[in-house]
Each structure stands twice: as structure tokens, then as C-alpha cells.
Amino acid sequence: MMTFAIIAVAGFLGLILLASLTLGLVVRKYSGQIFSSVFKKQDELERAPIDVLPAIAVGKRTQVWGGAGDTAAKTNYYVTFELEDGSRREYALWYGTMYGRIVEEDPVVLFARGDYAADFDLVTG
């Protein structure tokens, strides 16, 4: 009876080890493809030139996603700016804390990098 219990435990541990190794190989194979595109996008953004643009904040919005089955909801922050030439463009904010620092109709010097507002300085009169 004791021998059967030892064999059963050893077999169970063997199955766990085999499953772990298989899962590890699958994750190693596909995670590189997934993360390489994320890192490539981040690298492109970090290498992009910083455009310095006079602008006026004309709109703000948030995008909340996740939450229901996930551990926590995530929020993306966006501000639409009217540029000096009269065109309007929406930028994702590099840091969420920037969202609280700006109010619609604020004149700013915008530091944009790609589709992101990297930072801005408020223009005070």
C-alpha cells in the first residue's frame, strides 16, 4: 500500500514537471513574438523626435478597459489640442498624471513624440 502511494505521488509530480516544461516552452516560443512588437513600438517612440508645438487644449477624454474579470481596470488618457495652424489632433498622454494638470482652453507648449503628448508647459499670461 505504501509503495503504491509513493508511485502515485511520484507520477503526479512527474506530470506536473512535464506540464511545467511544456508550458515553459510554449511561453518561450510565443512571448518573444508578442513582446518584441511591444518593445519595437516603445523603441520607435523613444527614438522619435520631439515636436515642440504651441497649442490650446480643446478636449479631454479617458478610455477605461478591463476590470470585470481582470485584477484591475486600466485607464488611457487623451487630450485633443488645437495647433497653431488651426488643425486639431488628439494625443495619448505619456503619463496619466498629466491629465489632471490640464484644463480645456489652457494654452500650452506641447512636447509631442509620435502620437503621444510627452509633456507640456502651461503658458501663463
Image: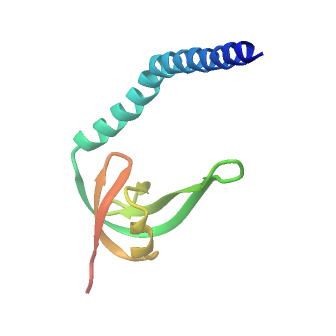
- In-front residue for pair 4/11: 4
The image shows residue 57 at horizontal and vertical percentages of 42, 69
The image shows residue 45 at horizontal and vertical percentages of 30, 42
Q: Does 108 appear above or below 80?
A: below
Q: Where is the N terminus found, in terms of image quarters?
A: top right
The image shows residue 2 at horizontal and vertical percentages of 72, 18
Q: Residue at x 50, y 67 (%)?
A: 59
Q: Does 55 appear above or below 118?
A: below
- In-front residue for pair 9/117: 9
Tell me where residue 15 sits by quadrant: top right
Q: Residue at x 30, y 54 (%)?
A: 112
Q: Residue at x 41, y 34 (%)?
A: 38
Using residue 2 as the reference point, say whether residue 110 is left or right of it: left
The image shows residue 47 at horizontal and vertical percentages of 22, 40
Tell me where residue 16 sits by quadrant: top right
Using residue 53 as the reference point, say whether residue 5 is left or right of it: right
Residue extending furthest toward the right: 1
Q: Where is the C terminus found, in terms of image quarters?
A: bottom left
